[in-house]
Amino acid sequence: MTNAEFAEYFKNRTKKFGLNIIKSFQKLPKTEEARTIGKQLLRSATSTAANYRAVCRARSDAEFFSKLSIVVEEADESVFWLEILLESEIVIASEISNTKSLLKEANEILSVVASSRKTMRNG
């Protein structure tokens, strides 16, 4: 897979992650704490996708690294909010397996972008 092909694949993957978070947000309980945490997750997950698109348009190595660092932060924040939803038991039982799969995907996205950033820093 070429760098351009991977970038396109990963843009689609992060966008799908954001869309899946939106769908999960819509199913959260209508409690104040669920909505507050859900909105934080919604912001960080969609920001992960939006900022990865910006990474692909970077005009310099410095801009690429900077924007990639934002993606790492947003993906890590998404992991955090998903963990909070699970560990606080805010997520209803029927959504737990879906939330766990979203957490797995968030961790995989985080791993890829953190590894890319580390490679760039060391390269």
Image: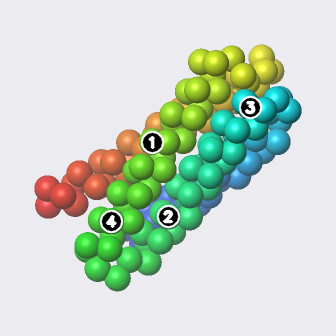
Percent position of residue 98, x then y: 70, 30
User: Which SS class for mark 1?
Assistant: helix
**Residue furthest bottom as drawn:** 59
Q: Quadrant of residue 67 in the image?
A: bottom left
- The residue at the point 74 percent across, 31 percent down is 34
Residue carrying label 1: 76
Q: Which of marks 2 and 3 is in front?
A: 3
Residue 43 x, y percent position in the rendering? 62, 52
**Residue 110's spot in the image, x, y percent?**
42, 44
Give the residue number, with chain letter if any, for mark 3.
Answer: 34
What secondary structure is marked by label 3?
helix
Q: Is mark 4 on a helix, strand or loop?
A: helix
Is label 3 or label 1 in front? 3
User: What type is the residue that disc 2 sits on?
Assistant: Asn
Residue named by callout 2: 51
User: Distance of mark 2 from mark 4, alpha carbons?
Assistant: 10 Å
Instruction: Inspect the image, locate mark 4, and give the three-letter code of the amino acid beneath it.
Output: Ser
Q: How many labels does the image show?
A: 4
Local crowd at mark 3 within 10 Å, few (<14), some, or many (≥20)?
some
List x then y, in percent, for residue 71: 44, 56
Q: In which quarter of the image is the C terminus?
A: bottom left
**CA separation in Å, label 3 and label 1:** 19 Å
